[in-house]
């Protein structure tokens, strides 16, 4: 519990790592994840640091590993999930590993290159056979297609052709044939036509099966074409155009015999290639299988190694270059662990001089570490989303555990809905070790991470639902109502008592639309319902008026208590940081201001509840008027709530008015007095003080000084106390702004808590509407058809309840609860200007990288 | 009309504009350049570039790293971004993008023709082509012998076709003719692009027109500078000048008559924009006219980002990125050739 109230105390430690053992020490530290390294070489650019070469080597290894993983996944070999987490490789093994991997890469590249070559060859041969098959039909068709020649005898026909060729063109007929991608056919034909001015004949046929493109590996449709042309010149052009469109050109056989021969040759070659290709693939698979066994752990090992070198890059060398100096933030509780890790690292490397550490005092604000477990984690996240707490300030997460679900439940009060939410959360909590939940998608993951918050939210909603007596918008009569209707009838009272009372008789009951129960009649109201709201209100027409009054007052009371609590937590902060004057000059006036106005409002609300009964309710004054009169001092005295009210109110008002100047001027004047009279008291204190007001520049300035000072610093023991510049104007301004914000905030924040009432009203009304629009329709139909109708109506009701009332309304209530915490509660005391403690830990690293890397 | 155009701009182009502004924010800063200049080897350069928006774009390059590898990878990256913009664009922004690629296409065509003239293999020349100006037909460029051939057979269906109207001729394509062709194409391209932006109106016109005017004038000045001492006649020279610049018409006529740098400078001195530029050339830091022009261009492009709801940002971004790539290549060259004295003469992007 204590660890959640304040962040853990930190210390700055210097590690002296012997250069031989530094790697092992960091490896041991990384496994434990105890410390956060500070960058001592901030103004050295990344490529001028000490261990750049090693980092580069790691990157090279990573590149090879990525290539390996890529190849392995391509042939569908399952990647074995490596053992939990192999340690970073010892330095001696690194070279060996690098050699192995490089050899493997070279081999793989060669084999895949061969494979690709074979494959390409094979594809080309297949294309060629297809082409031969298709073009055969072209020629035959050409012959059949010329009916004019058919009438002539065959011989004559031939000679005529030969003759014309020789005579007219002085060149022979040429053919270019090949394959072209489907999409390019049209443009190809057009360009052929334009470039060759029509001296070509192009024939196409679509290939019925799609083939792989040897270059890109895409499977696409191809066209087989045959271009016939006359003359050398055009032939060159045609070939160039074919090149331009990346056609695959194959020699065109002139005679049928030649064609057959080629085809046979091709078939045997294809057979051969198939067998060779299979063998190559088998071999490749073997190699990859072997590689797959270790690749996962290798990836992790290299990541760790790289991380270690990155950390080593943050260390500075001492003068003799024999040891590295690292500065780390470490929780004080973990110091023994840190020592042990260093010893372990030194022992592993077998160094003669052990690495050691010592703590150094500092004025800098350490990072904030709040240890959480899986229950508190979610609540801490809500607070951290607003701002990570400053070092050692009161952590609101502890109180958020209760107040957050409670304020949520005030808005979400319905024990039916709450119970459903509770069950859902319980399901998540019970199955939290299920692997599928941990790797789930974004939205479910969000719910999963907040499962304990949901659980508490559900539980609290059940509680507030019982108070509101709302279950899916219906009330439940558990203990029997405190109201008795029969007492209203005139017959149940003796005639002499009936005189002043408005009683019912049969005719009134039959003819009037609404009937009023009068609690002042004896026997009608038999005392309050034991727990929550009386179920009879569910039938009343003035139910809303009654509930509104109740919920409004309740939200004001809760809000003021919540805010006052925040101011009180501020006192704990002031006590801890030894700024007692802040208590008297800031916190006390703040509390006075709040309580004298709004505390008194609460008092009036509760007093009115207690002091007036059903009989005296007619002369009860309005709280609103009384409250306004407190500030306006009306001339005519009203009779008020209690005797002496005017005096009490004047006193309270006087206190309030007095608190304001103290709030505005107290702290600046006090600081001024301190500065003039007793210089530097309370501002400089041994050990840590909060220096969150230090500007960024100052912090970085300090950092650079550290580097320059180098080793002298530790001999000095304590660093120079940089006295803060005293600037009265600035302090006055800050305090004035803070005070104005607070005083106005008291009013606006109180009003802001009315959202509790508004949202709870909205939720109740929405569920009421849903019931009235759906279930009532279903229930009204008579029994025979009602069953049939009720089933879909029920399903629809369930769906709408879940999506609108649970998820949508739940989210809105969640948001408002967050807002109430962040704005109304936390601005009373929480600074949230810290930085999170991020330890150098392999567990953070490997989980983060392995996912996106292997996937 | 003006207001409504701004009102609806984001419906069609808002996403891309947001994207391009984000990309612009990732351009290298002054600090980055300072760090890059300090690098000792190309490996250092690579490590430093990893910390910028370039990321590990060189991660899969096997060593040794060369300047040309860096250049191609950077170009590829720019091309990927540009293709993304282009694939997600709607009319008339996509036409605008097409116009942007045209200048690269012209360069590529000329490069290929020069390559063919020197009997280099197409593959070799293709590797040098700018990926932004790549199109399928361009590999067939070398089948053409004359300009009209080139137009009729190869380029008639490309976006370049409309620019050919002025330069149809039956001359064989020798080196001079190719250069003339390039300039004529560029002239009509710039004029067409200028007209497109002008017709589009709105902020786009307000931003793009000055940029294109400057581009046109720069070409005119550079052509004049390069034609001193060549056989190009003055009349021919005048036909190459793009007419959409500030120099048109009076300045161009004077430029056509100019015979040396001083005369050219006298022409430029008549214009408020160009006077300071020419003055900067002579000054101590040893800048060339080209550098000064680049600097001015960078300035104009950066200013384009000050207005919203126009297409100029895309043009400006690509130009800025190009300048950045030129800078990195310059620095990388200086590093690899151990020529550190001139390493600082890159053109900083403000």
Image (tube, coloured by chain):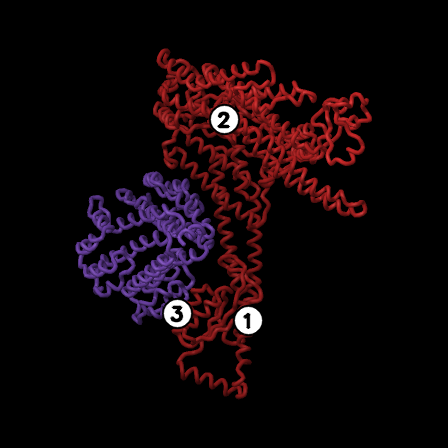
Residue placed under numbered mark 1 in the picture: A134
- Tell me the quarter of the image containing the N terminus of chain B: bottom left
Whether residue B12 appears in this view of the structure is yes
Which is nearer the eye, A544 or A317?
A544
Secondary structure type for disc 3: helix
Which is nearer the eye, B278 or A652?
A652
Q: The disc numbered 1 marks a residue on which chain?
A: A
Chain A: give its colour: red
Residue A261 screen position, x and y as percent: 54, 72
Residue placed under numbered mark 2 in the picture: A745
CA separation, marks 1 and 2? 87 Å
Residue placed under numbered mark 3 in the picture: B153
Q: Is residue A454 above or below residue A855?
A: above
Give the mark toward the camera: 3 or 1: 3
Q: Residues within 10 Å of mark 1 (few under 14, many from 20)?
A: some
Give the mark toward the camera: 1 or 2: 2
Lower sequence index among marks 1 and 2: 1
Please indicate whether residue A652 sits to the left or right of residue A800 in the image.
Answer: left
Tell me whether marks 3 and 1 sit on the same chain.
no
Q: Which mark is residue A729?
A: none
């Amino acid at each position: 519990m204590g660890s959640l109230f304040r962040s853990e105390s930190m210390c700055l430690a210097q590690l002296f790592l012997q250069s031989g053992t530094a790697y092992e020490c960091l490896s041991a530290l990384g496994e434990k994840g105890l410390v956060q390294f500070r960058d001592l070489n901030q103004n050295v650019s990344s490529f001028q640091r000490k261990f750049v070469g090693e980092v580069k080597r790691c990157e090279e290894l990573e590149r090879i590993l990525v290539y390996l993983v890529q190849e392995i996944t391509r042939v569908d070999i399952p990647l074995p999930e490596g053992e939990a987490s192999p340690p970073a490789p010892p330095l001696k093994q690194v070279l060996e590993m690098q050699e192995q991997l490089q050899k493997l890469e070279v081999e793989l590249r060669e084999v895949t290159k061969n494979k690709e070559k074979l494959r390409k060859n094979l594809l080309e041969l297949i294309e060629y056979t297809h082409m031969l098959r298709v073009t055969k039909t072209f020629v035959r068709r050409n012959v059949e297609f010329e009916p004019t020649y058919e009438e002539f005898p065959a011989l004559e026909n031939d000679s005529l052709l030969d003759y014309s060729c020789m005579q007219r063109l002085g060149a022979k007929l040429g053919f270019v044939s090949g394959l072209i991608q489907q999409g390019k056919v049209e443009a190809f034909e057009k360009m052929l036509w334009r470039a060759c001015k029509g001296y070509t004949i192009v024939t196409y046929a679509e290939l019925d099966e799609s083939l792989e493109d040897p270059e890109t590996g895409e499977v696409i449709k191809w066209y087989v074409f045959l271009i016939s042309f006359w003359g050398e010149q055009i032939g060159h052009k045609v070939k160039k155009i074919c090149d331009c469109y990346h056609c695959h050109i194959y020699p065109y056989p002139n005679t049928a015999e030649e064609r057959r021969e080629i085809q046979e040759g091709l078939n045997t070659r294809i057979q051969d290639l198939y067998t060779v290709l299979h063998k190559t693939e088998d071999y490749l698979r073997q190699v990859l299988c072997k590689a797959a066994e270790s690749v996962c752990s290798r990836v992790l090992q290299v990541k760790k190694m790289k991380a270690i070198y990155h950390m080593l890059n943050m260390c500075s060398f001492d003068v003799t270059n024999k040891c590295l100096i690292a500065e780390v933030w470490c929780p004080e509780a973990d110091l023994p662990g840190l020592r042990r890790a260093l010893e372990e690292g030194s022992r592993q490397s077998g160094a003669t001089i052990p690495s050691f550490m010592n703590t150094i005092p500092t004025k800098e604000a350490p990072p904030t570490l709040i240890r959480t477990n899986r229950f508190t984690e979610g609540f801490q996240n809500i607070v951290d989303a607003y701002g990570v707490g400053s070092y050692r300030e009161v952590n609101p997460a502890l109180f958020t555990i209760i107040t957050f679900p409670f304020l949520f439940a005030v808005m979400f009060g319905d024990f039916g809905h709450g119970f459903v939410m509770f069950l859902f959360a319980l399901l998540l909590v019970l199955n939290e070790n299920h692997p599928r939940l941990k790797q789930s998608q974004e939205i479910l993951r969000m719910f999963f991470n907040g499962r304990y918050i949901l659980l508490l939210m559900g539980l609290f909603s059940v509680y507030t639902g019982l108070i509101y007596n709302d279950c899916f918008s219906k009330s439940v009569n558990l203990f029997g109502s405190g109201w008795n209707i029969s007492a209203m009838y005139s017959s149940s009272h003796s005639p002499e008592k009936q005189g002043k009372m408005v009683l019912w008789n049969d005719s009134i009951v039959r003819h009037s639309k609404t009937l009023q129960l009068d609690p002042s009649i004896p026997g009608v109201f038999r005392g309050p319902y034991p727990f929550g709201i009386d179920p009879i209100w569910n039938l009343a027409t003035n139910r809303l008026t009654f509930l509104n009054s109740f919920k409004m007052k309740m939200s004001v009371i809760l809000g003021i208590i919540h805010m006052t609590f925040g101011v009180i937590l501020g006192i704990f902060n002031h006590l801890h940081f030894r700024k007692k004057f802040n208590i008297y000059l800031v916190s006390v006036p703040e509390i006075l201001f709040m309580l004298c106005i709004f505390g008194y409002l609460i008092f009036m609300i509760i007093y009115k509840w207690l002091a007036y009964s059903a009989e005296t309710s007619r002369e009860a004054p309005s709280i609103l008027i009384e409250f306004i009169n407190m500030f306006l001092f009306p001339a005519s005295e009203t009779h008020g709530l209690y005797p002496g009210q005017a005096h009490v109110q004047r006193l309270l008002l006087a206190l309030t008015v007095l608190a304001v100047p103290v709030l505005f001027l107290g702290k600046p004047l006090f600081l001024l007095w301190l500065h003039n009279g007793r210089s530097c008291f309370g501002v400089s204190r041994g050990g840590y003080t909060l220096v969150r007001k230090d500007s960024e520049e100052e912090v970085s300035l300090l950092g650079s000084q550290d580097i320059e000072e180098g080793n002298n610093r530790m001999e000095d023991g304590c660093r120079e106390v940089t006295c803060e510049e005293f600037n009265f104007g600035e302090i006055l301004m800050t305090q004035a702004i803070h005070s104005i914000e607070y005083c106005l905030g008291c009013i606006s924040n109180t009003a802001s808590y009315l959202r509790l009432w508004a949202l709870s009203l909205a939720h109740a009304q929405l569920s009421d509407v849903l019931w009235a629009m759906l279930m009532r329709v279903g229930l009204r139909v008579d029994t025979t058809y009602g069953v049939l109708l009720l089933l879909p109506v029920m399903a629809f009701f369930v769906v709408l309840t879940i999506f609108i009332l649970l998820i949508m309304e739940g989210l809105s209530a969640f948001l408002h609860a967050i807002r109430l915490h962040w704005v109304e509660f936390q601005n009373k005391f929480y600074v949230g200007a810290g930085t999170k403690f991020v330890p150098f830990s392999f567990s953070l690293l490997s989980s983060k990288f392995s996912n996106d890397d292997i996937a | 009309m003006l207001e409504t155009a701004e009102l609806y701009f984001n419906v069609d182009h808002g996403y891309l504009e947001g994207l391009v502004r984000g990309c612009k924010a990732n351009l290298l800063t002054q600090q980055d350049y300072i760090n890059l200049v300090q690098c000792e080897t190309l490996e250092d350069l690579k490590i430093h570039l990893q910390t910028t928006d370039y990321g590990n774009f060189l991660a899969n390059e096997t060593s040794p790293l060369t300047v040309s590898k860096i250049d191609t990878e950077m170009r590829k990256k720019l091309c990927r971004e540009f293709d993304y913009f282009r694939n997600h664009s709607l009319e008339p922004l996509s036409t605008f993008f097409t116009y942007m690629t045209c200048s690269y296409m012209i360069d590529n065509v000329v490069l290929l023709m020069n390559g063919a003239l020197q009997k280099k293999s197409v593959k070799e020349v293709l590797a040098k082509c700018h990926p932004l100006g790549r199109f399928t037909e361009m590999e067939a460029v070398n089948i053409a012998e004359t300009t009209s051939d080139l137009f009729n057979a190869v380029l008639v269906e490309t976006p370049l076709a409309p620019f050919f109207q002025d330069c149809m001729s039956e001359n064989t394509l020798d080196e001079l003719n190719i250069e003339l062709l390039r300039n004529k194409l560029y002239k009509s391209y710039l004029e067409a692009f200028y007209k497109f932006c002008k017709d589009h109106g709105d902020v786009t016109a307000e931003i793009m027109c000055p940029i294109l005017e400057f581009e046109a004038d720069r070409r005119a000045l550079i052509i004049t500078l390069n034609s001193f001492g060549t056989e190009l006649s003055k009349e021919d020279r005048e036909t190459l000048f793009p007419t959409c610049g500030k120099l048109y018409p009076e300045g161009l006529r004077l430029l056509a008559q100019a015979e040396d740098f001083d005369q050219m400078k006298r022409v430029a001195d008549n214009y408020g924009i160009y006077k300071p530029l020419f003055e900067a050339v002579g000054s101590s830091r040893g800048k060339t006219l080209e550098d000064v022009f680049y600097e001015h261009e960078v300035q104009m492009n950066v200013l384009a980002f000050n207005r919203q709801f126009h297409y100029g940002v895309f043009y400006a971004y690509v130009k800025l990125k190009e300048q950045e790539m030129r800078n990195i290549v310059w620095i990388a060259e200086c590093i690899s050739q151990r020529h550190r004295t001139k390493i600082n003469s890159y053109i900083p992007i403000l």
